[in-house]
Image (cartoon, rainbow, N blue to C red):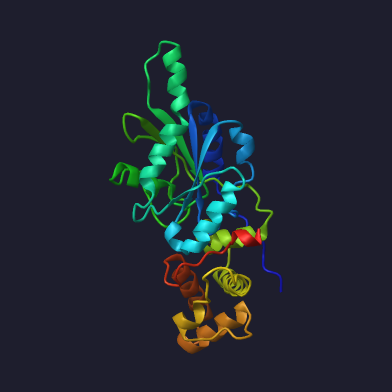
Amino acid sequence: MKNPAIQWYPGHIAKAERQLKENLSRVDVVLEVRDARIPLATNHPQLDGWLGEKSRVLVLNRRDAIPDDVRHAWDGWFRDRDVVPLFTDAKRGKGVGQLARAAEAAGRSVNDRRKKRGMRPRPVRAVVIGFPNVGKSALINRLLRKKVVESARKAGVTRQLRWVRISDKLELLDAPGIIPWQLHDQDAAVKLAICDDIGQASYSNFNVAAQMVDFIDDLVADSAEFSLSNPLSDRYDLPMGTLTGEEYIEELGNVRYNGDIERAARQLLNDFRTGKLGSMPLELPSAN
């Protein structure tokens, strides 16, 4: 049976997108934040058209959620395409210092031009852009070393644009998460749902968890060059064997949750999102 399409484009995101486009002319640098577990699925397809030639810094947040060898492979993959990614862990603060330095460096030409015109330097203005719940606000709070903007591990927390002064050299515009108004790539949409980068009202926990089990099983089977193993058997003491994702959840519900299949699906998703399944990506550079 075919799963219903996942679509999510609430009114506050539509409004935020309009406001973001209006403010892009005021910023010098764009910090594009993606989810390191799914760096391709969190690539907004319209961003290139919006930004044109504006300076950009690619940030892959949640570096802690993928193994080191996968991170190194993604680093090489992006560098082969003339992009130098920054890997951060906003939760623990890893890599955050380099983010501020990269933003300042990317915007340095602004003050060089001001100096030539006899104008005084001003802080570099950067906007933080990305899908919902990829860690944009958490990164800003880490840069400030205090909680100034609201942050939580769920989609749709930031609802309006807000300027935040990081230092006398850098100002950041915190923007709500943006997402295409229509998700044509449903594999990518499922990955967004698995990683909690999209509103929960847009999908069925059971369907998404079942596809997550299948994704993990296929990824591990096809990734001999990476240090990946299927964490499901160890976590739940339930071998995958030849079970499909749907069958695995049904079996898990019967064995551990008194037949409560929905609870089993929720638990699987929560364990993935909170790292209890270990460092587990859903995309690999060798497969793209």
Q: Quadrant of the N terminus?
A: bottom right
Task: Tell me the residue at 64%/45% (across/down).
Answer: 45
Above or below, 51 against 99 in this view is above
Residue found farthest to the left: 146
Left or right for 186, reference 134: right
Q: Position of residue 142 (x, y in %)?
A: 33, 47
Q: Position of residue 238 (x, y in %)?
A: 51, 86
Q: Is residue 9 visible?
A: no
Find residue 202 and report its image quarter: bottom right
Q: Between residues 162 and 49, which one lies in front from this camera angle?
A: 49
Task: Tell me the residue at 48%/72% (across/down).
Answer: 266
Q: Quadrant of the C terminus?
A: bottom right
Q: Between residues 56 and 161, which one lies in front from this camera angle?
A: 56
Q: Between residues 224 and 103, which one lies in front from this camera angle?
A: 224
Residue found farthest to the right: 1
Residue found farthest to the top: 118
Task: Tell me the residue at 56%/42% (across/down).
Answer: 14
Q: Position of residue 136 (x, y in %)?
A: 43, 47
